[in-house]
């Protein structure tokens, strides 16, 4: 039993030590500044992918659509700005964007959460959510998406 446990611990340590990624705040800020220049009100880029999860950086200058990821959980880390996150409730005018991804115009009956720099948000798979950006605002956030939920 001790040998198996020891090997398991060494394997786990090896898995974590082998491939780490560090996304410095300075690098994320520089990437966000580049994304802001697209002039579309929203831009995102995938930073890295591993197995069942991946990371993104997103910048919003306008309110996004309501969305539901049927098989992906989201973790947001707010990098800059303020927004209101609406979660729960029902997506208004739902449409399937692609398999497992539903978008809509808004959320009816959701809960509003004020979010700002440094906040960390977990949105489980299947939960409707929408970011409301104040007029003239800029909001950037680091995202970890976990698939297979």
Image (cartoon, rainbow, N blue to C red):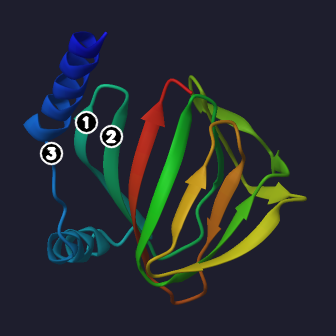
Looking at the image, tell me whether mark 2 or mark 3 is earlier in sequence order: 3
- Marks 1/2: CA–CA distance: 4 Å
Pointer 2 residue: 54
Compared with 15, 66 (above or below) is below
Q: Nearer the viewer, mark 2 or mark 3?
A: 3
41 is higher (above) or lower (below) than 48: below
Residue in front for this viewpoint, 9 or 147: 9
Nearest to N terminus: mark 1 or mark 2: 1
Q: How much space separates mark 3 and mark 1, taking CA atoms?
A: 12 Å
Residue extending furthest toward the left: 18
**Quick check: marks 1 and 2 in contact, CB under 8 Å?**
yes
Query: Dot 1: few (<14), some (14–19), or many (≥20) neighbours within 10 Å?
Result: few
Position in image of residue 54 (x %, y %)? 33, 40
Quarter of the rendering occupied by the C terminus:
top right
**Res 22 → quadrant:** bottom left
Residue ID at (52%, 90%)? 136
Image height check: is 30 above or below 109? below
User: What is the distance, in whole Å, between disc 2 and disc 3 at their CAs?
Assistant: 13 Å
- Residue found 45% across the figure and 36% down from its top: 146
* Residue at (73, 64) in percent of width and height: 86
SS at badge 1:
strand
Residue 20 image label: 3
Q: Are marks 2 and 3 in contact (CB under 8 Å)?
A: no
How many numbered tags mark residues here? Answer: 3
Name the mark nearer the viewer: 3 or 1: 3
Q: Secondary structure at mark 3?
A: loop
Work out whether mark 3 precedes mark 1 in sequence or the reverse, and give the earlier one.
3
Q: Quadrant of the N terminus?
A: top left
Cβ atoms under marks 3 and 1 closer than 8 Å: no
Tag 1 residue? 49
Image quarter of residue 30: bottom left
């Amino acid at each position: 039993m001790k040998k198996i446990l020891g090997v398991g611990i060494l394997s786990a340590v090896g898995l974590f030590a082998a491939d780490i990624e560090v996304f410095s705040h300075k690098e994320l800020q520089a990437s966000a500044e580049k994304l802001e220049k697209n002039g579309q009100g929203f831009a995102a880029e995938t930073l890295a992918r591993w197995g069942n999860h991946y990371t993104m950086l997103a910048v919003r200058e306008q309110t996004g659509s309501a969305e539901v990821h049927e098989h992906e959980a989201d973790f947001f880390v707010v990098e800059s700005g303020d927004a209101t996150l609406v979660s729960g409730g029902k997506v208004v005018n739902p449409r399937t964007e692609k398999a497992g991804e539903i978008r809509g115009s808004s959320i009816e009956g959701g809960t509003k959460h004020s979010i700002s720099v440094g906040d960390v948000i977990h949105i489980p798979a299947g939960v409707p959510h929408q970011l409301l950006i104040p007029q003239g605002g800029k909001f950037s956030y680091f995202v970890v998406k976990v698939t297979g939920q």
